[in-house]
Amino acid sequence: AMGMMTRLGMSNALLLLWLSAASALVVDLNTEHDGRSVFHITSFGYEENGVFQMELKDFVLLVPSSHHNEYTEEKTKNKLVFVLQHSGSGGVRIEEGTSEVCFHETQENVSQNDEIISLPFEVIADKKEFTWKSKISEPGSYHLYFSNCLPGTKIGFKVELTQYNLFHGTKVFLPAGKASLPIIYGTLCLAFVSSFVFWCMYLCKNHLYVVTIHLLMGVVALFKAFTLFSEAFEYHWLKTTGKPHGWNIAFYIFSFLKGMLLFTVIVLIGTGWSYLKPYLTERDKQVMLVVIVVQAMVNVAMVMLDETAPGAIGWLTWRDLLHLLDMLCCCAILLPIVWSIRHLTQASERDGKAARDAERLKQFRKFYMVVVAYIYVTRVVVFLLDATLPFEYTWLANVFSECTSLLFYVGTGWLFRPRGRNPYLVVGGEDDDNEEMDIEPVPMADNK
């Protein structure tokens, strides 16, 4: 399994290097043969006097050859437009669609506060470059759409979007609700580093009871700190220049390693490896393989999602695939915990061991609830917060997610900390020698 993890890590790193040039807050979108009637391109949180700038080039309108002469200036007038839609929160009204109802001609989709940018006929007919610049007067979250109200046609274009707020004359390329993220991620990085240092000190103090899983738990915390460190610098450069300057590569690499280690450690804890038994069963190995492969696929989907603009064809497919694979991985890591709970439930009914196994069962159920709560908060609640919070407070969703992760790391460490009378590590009498789940832990010197 470790060899497979290494190969997957190398392939992911090569993919990240290949895609690194595409990542930037300054959005570049290139679409071809696009038959969608409407699609969302990007969103940004503006303060008062924020700037929206668009540069459009190589616009192509593809029409049926038999009706080529029918698409005159009169017919195309106000039919091919960009819509800059104002919203109080971060929620997107529509992702994409092929409805026959014209998106920008319905009051449900467009209000008086929205800006409709209609393409001149010379841009449509002669592929002339088109530039548009707006100064935002009303703060809020703004969503940019392209709307095509010419049924049966397809379009193609290249567009570069530059969006920023002005604070005391300085350009800030992060949305209003994300401008504080560099400091927030830096602070959270220090919190995880402190947790890692405390964990190392605790392991040294209780070294006689330390097993391999305790060391792996420390490594996960360390890579989580590295991930936040690279993310803090990535957002710093995005804030000041609109581009990550290579820090997105570091973030993807550390995030991949952290995610792989985190899910692996959760699976190993759920199986009882190294602290209740020194080996993995064939069933445990199969779960490990599924988790490693799916987590690698999650990271590929995450990179593809981050490195392409939301308006690109296939972006929604990558997003849905990411969510599906992520939930599959989350379900997979729960299986070993459920199996251990079932095993301990059966073992607790046997004579002479009921008290000890009942205590272990209680602890495993606690761990199961902690994992379920962590998955629910970081996969469901955070997305709801990000979509519903006022635009200037969307940073709270990031803080909530990372603080939940910190509590999960600390809680798991507390449940499984090495100590002489840890209910996980207490060993009963001679009857336990043949029990798969009841093997006595040994000091690290012998546990190799």
Image (cartoon, rainbow, N blue to C red):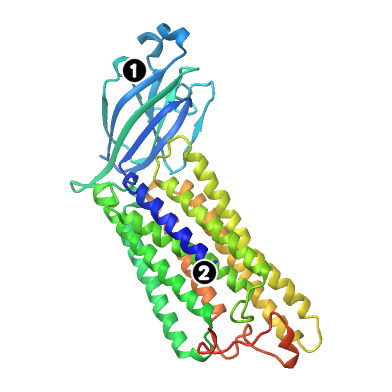
Task: Out of 373 and 122, give the one closest to the viewer.
Answer: 122
Q: Which residue is mark 2?
A: 408
The residue located at (29%, 26%) in the rendering is: 57
391 sits left or right of 342 in the view: left
Q: Which residue is mark 1?
A: 124
Determine the CA span between mark 1 and mark 2: 54 Å
Q: Residue 15: where, in percent of width, then height?
A: 40, 51
Is 23 situated above or below 99?
below
Q: Quadrant of residue 360?
A: bottom right
385 sits left or right of 46 in the view: right
Q: Residue 435: where, in percent of width, then height?
A: 73, 83
Binning the other alpha carbons within 10 Å of mark 1 as few (below 14), some (14 to 19) or many (20 upward) gives: some
Is 277 situated above or below 243?
below
Q: Which numbered marker is on residue 361?
A: none
136 sits left or right of 401 in the view: left
| Local SS, label 1 | helix
